[in-house]
Amino acid sequence: MKYGVKYCAVNPESGREHEAKYELRLAKTRKKVLVVGGGIGGMQAALSCSERGHQVMLCEKNDVLGGAIRCEKDVPFKKKLAMYLDSQARAIAKSSIDLHLNTEVTPEIASILKPDVIIAALGSRPVKPDIPGIDEPNVLGAEEAYLYPQKVGKKAVIIGAGFVGLELAIYLTMLGKVVSVVELTDKISDGGNILHARSLEVELKKHQIDIKFNSKVKEISPQGILWEAENKEEFLEVNSVIYAVGQKPLQDEALALRFCAPEFHLIGDCITPQNITAATGTAHDIALSLGRF
């Protein structure tokens, strides 16, 4: 991305108007494109490739488009995100894109399809921290907590003060639960999005959510967690423990497809977990580069 240019998360052409003026709307060479993964990046890649006139097949291993972020669909302050995902899914349904849900693409399947281009947008999966007791029945990942908040007890602790964990803390508090957060570092992990972090701080204060910085969870039990700060250990009694300590790119799974087509591209979280703007922007840029000559 160019320094000083303002980009839109949901409209990848915004901020790239000058580039678009010199791009043919339709590609000079029409290609057979296989997009693997129907998350934010994969959906945008499929749409942008289709708009350029390419023959596009989009395969998603789950029964709905949108990717892992769909787990936040019931969060009140995430309604616009759900609307955006639904809008993209409708656009795909109305297009000429050949959509296949419940379809996991293996190297064998990809080779049979014989695409000219593969765009791998497999995303990432949550990291499960190596903490004694992490497999206790009262422990769950953030994605599961978002999908099934009824599984979370009245009093909960979230491990990790990134946006996923903090937004989950706010959501669970809105549902009447008492939530605290334990963070290993000395600040919110904002990923460079300072404005979002500042807005979250307002909500965290409003909902009286306690964040324990510079703190390490040493052990989990059915009764709660043993945590350490400044060389002092304390026990926090909770009903549920939720981990939100980051994502691991599905890079190996994506790279397994790299020899199944003459041209191969990685996009989105399977490279490294990023934001929506990065995912849609990269997807659109790759689509514009295909078949130019």
Image (cartoon, rainbow, N blue to C red):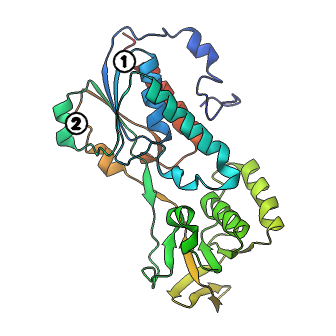
Above-or-below relation of 247 to 134: above
Q: Quadrant of residue 153?
A: bottom right
User: Would residue 284 be found to the left or right of residue 208 on screen?
Assistant: left
Q: Which residue is mark 2?
A: 110
User: Any mark on residue 184, and which?
Assistant: none
> Along the polypeptide, which appears first: circle 2 or circle 1?
1
User: Would residue 175 be found to the left or right of residue 141 on screen?
Assistant: right
Q: Nearer the viewer, residue 128 or 154?
A: 154
Above-or-below relation of 24 to 215: above
Task: Tell me the kind of residue under disc 2.
Answer: Ala
Q: Position of residue 253 (x, y in %)?
A: 30, 49
Q: Label 2, label 1: how many angstroms apart (C-alpha)? A: 17 Å
User: Would residue 12 be found to the left or right of residue 113 on screen?
Assistant: right
In which quadrant is the C terminus drawn? Answer: top left
User: Any mark on residue 54, and which?
Assistant: 1
Q: Position of residue 74 (x, y in %)?
A: 61, 55
Q: Quadrant of residue 180?
A: bottom right
* Disc 2 secondary structure class: helix
Above-or-below relation of 1 to 179: above
